[in-house]
Amino acid sequence: MKNFKKFKEAILIIALICSVSAFMSCDDQSAKGVKHDPNKSVDVRSFQPSEGRVRDYVLVEGNNFGSDKSIIQVFFNDSEAKILGVNETGTTILVLVERIPFPNGDGEAEVSVQIGNKKSKAPGLFSYKVSASVTTLAGNGTNGNSYASGKLSDLLLSGPTYIGVDYDYNAYF
């Protein structure tokens, strides 16, 4: 009977320790990150690298971004970048550059951050370079061509086959 009482006390102490540690860890989770202060302005200090292509990563640094990426928008001219993450202090945003339309391909873009109705431009311009990527769309290297209607992936091509792209990014095969 005495051993059972000690066993109950030990279980109670273990349960109390687990409860306190769970409560404290939940408290630590909510303390992580900062909120954007709507009473202060958004400040964009810099971005790096200063040049890149579509799907390149860019770090935008500044103040009062907050750590909630769902309320932040980053623009390269009028093209919105995809936000991959924001650090816990709300001072750095990691974005993925989307396609920036320029009449002649390459160009320079202003980088800006918008949170709610507050927008701030970064000093300097981002130098955007159009790039091409090469990939196999169809073909298997056999010595015969097979043309038929259907999916491009089912087409068998052997010899040189050319692809052209116009200024509106329409592909011609």
Image (spheres, rainbow, N blue to C red):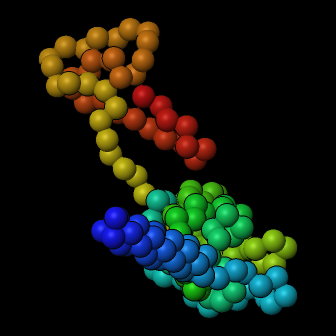
For the question of whether residue 20 can be seen, the reply is: yes
Q: Name the one closer to the observer, 82 or 104.
A: 82
The picture quadrant where one finds residue 155 is top left
- State the residue at coordinates (34%, 11%): 147
Q: Name the one closer to the observer, 160 or 101.
A: 101
- State the residue at coordinates (14%, 17%): 143
91 on left or right of 165: right
64 on left or right of 33: right
> Does residue 99 sit above or below 68 in this rendering?
above
What is the x, y in percent for residue 166? 54, 42
157 on left or right of 55: left
Q: Quadrant of the C terminus?
A: top left
For the question of whether residue 127 can be seen, the reply is: no
The picture quadrant where one finds residue 43 is bottom right
> Does residue 124 sit above or below 142 in this rendering?
below
What is the x, y in percent for residue 11? 40, 67
Residue extending farthest to the top is 148
- State the residue at coordinates (64%, 82%): 34
What is the x, y in percent for residue 144? 19, 13
Query: Total label count?
Result: 0
Q: Name the one closer to the observer, 139 or 71.
A: 71
- State the residue at coordinates (44%, 9%): 149
What is the x, y in percent for residue 21? 47, 76
